[in-house]
Image (cartoon, helix red, strand yellow):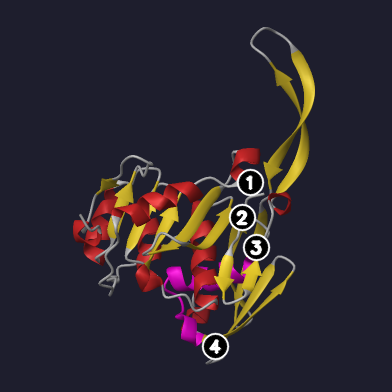
């Protein structure tokens, strides 16, 4: 069975299976010929996750109920709230995640709870000279579908792949942004150098999604979908290569083409 989360560091492996992400529900299937029948289908699980920073609620995310520690760490980094070195600890209690900072009180605590996806005016620049062979990017097509998606048709996927086309992290979530946060969080927790990996995503790429990857220092994002114009413009400014419509036989490179070796 295909694994949903694969993280490797030395001998360490973590594996989460599709049943952890799904729940069965009854439904009635009606056919075009008038025939009807009772059935049971698997739906993707979603739950509210409250994120606390030094004791004060920061935001509420709606996500798949697994890899919550990775979600918290990745969200703080990709939203530009904290750097990894500022995080002193992360504790998960049910659907609440409590993050402690080294200073014990982050300046954002003096603000109102911050909505997920809030835009920033600060310019982000990916400081990496990584160049990828096309073969390494095409290799990502093997990881674009998870068992959870095949069962529910209701999840997104994010993966991190190195310059040789080898899978480092693969995570599923009901939200495309959550999947990216979890993949980034997993990478930082396992000390994976993101400056030499690319992000594989199943979601569309507006500026918000591209900026998340750029804040994490990821030099290339490839998606099976298409970017928005805002995503292309954000990628140009961030020194990030944006690839859309990734297929086994072709891909579209929109920005910073020098990162794909031809």
Q: Assess whether mark 2 and mark 3 are in contact (beta carbons under 8 angstroms).
A: no
Across and down, in percent, residue 232 comes to: 26, 52
Q: Secondary structure at mark 3?
A: strand
Marks 3 and 4 sit apart, C-alpha to C-alpha, by 21 Å
Q: Earlier in the sequence, mark 4 or mark 2?
A: 2
Q: Earlier in the sequence, mark 2 or mark 1?
A: 2
Residue visible at 49% across and 86% down? 86
Among the 4 quarters of the image, the one containing residue 34: top right
Relative side of 164 to 168, left or right:
left
Across and down, in percent, residue 50 comes to: 64, 66
Marks 1 and 4 sit apart, C-alpha to C-alpha, by 39 Å
Residue visible at 29% across and 58% down? 133
Residue at the disc numbered 3: 49
Which of the labelled discs sits on residue 148, or is there none?
1
Residue mark closest to the camera, 1 vs 3: 1
Q: Earlier in the sequence, mark 3 or mark 2?
A: 2
Residue at the disc numbered 4: 105
Q: Assess whether mark 1 and mark 2 are in contact (beta carbons under 8 angstroms).
A: yes
On the question of residue 113 being in view, the answer is no
Marks 2 and 1 sit apart, C-alpha to C-alpha, by 8 Å
Which of the labelled discs sits on residue 4, or is there none?
2
Residue visible at 32% across and 46% down? 228
Tally of numbered tags? 4
Q: Is residue 192 magenta?
A: no
Marks 4 and 2 sit apart, C-alpha to C-alpha, by 35 Å
Q: Secondary structure at mark 4?
A: loop
| Span colored in magenta | 67-86
């Amino acid at each position: 069975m295909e694994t949903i989360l694969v993280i490797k560091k030395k001998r360490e492996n973590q594996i989460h299976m599709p049943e952890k992400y799904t729940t069965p529900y009854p439904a009635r299937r009606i056919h075009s010929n008038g025939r009807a029948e009772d059935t049971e289908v698997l739906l993707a699980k979603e739950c509210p996750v409250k994120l606390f920073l030094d004791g004060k609620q920061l935001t509420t995310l709606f996500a798949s109920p697994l890899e919550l520690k990775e979600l918290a760490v990745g969200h703080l980094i990709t939203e530009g709230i904290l750097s990894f070195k500022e995080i002193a600890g992360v504790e998960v209690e049910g659907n609440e995640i409590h993050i402690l900072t080294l200073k014990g009180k982050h300046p954002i605590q003096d603000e109102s709870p911050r909505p997920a996806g809030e835009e920033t005016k600060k310019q982000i620049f990916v400081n990496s000279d990584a160049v990828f062979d096309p073969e390494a990017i095409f290799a990502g097509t093997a990881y674009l579908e998870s068992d959870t998606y095949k069962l529910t048709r209701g999840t997104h996927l994010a993966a991190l792949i190195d310059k040789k086309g080898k899978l480092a992290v693969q995570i599923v979530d009901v939200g495309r942004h959550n999947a990216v946060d979890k993949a980034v969080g997993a990478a930082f927790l396992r000390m994976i150098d993101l400056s030499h990996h690319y992000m594989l995503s199943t979601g569309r790429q507006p500026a918000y999604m591209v900026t998340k990857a750029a804040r994490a220092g990821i030099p290339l994002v490839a998606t099976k979908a298409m970017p928005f114009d805002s995503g292309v413009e954000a990628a140009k400014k961030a020194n990030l290569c944006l690839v859309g419509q990734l297929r086994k036989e072709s891909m579209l490179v929109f920005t910073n083409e020098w990162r794909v070796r031809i």
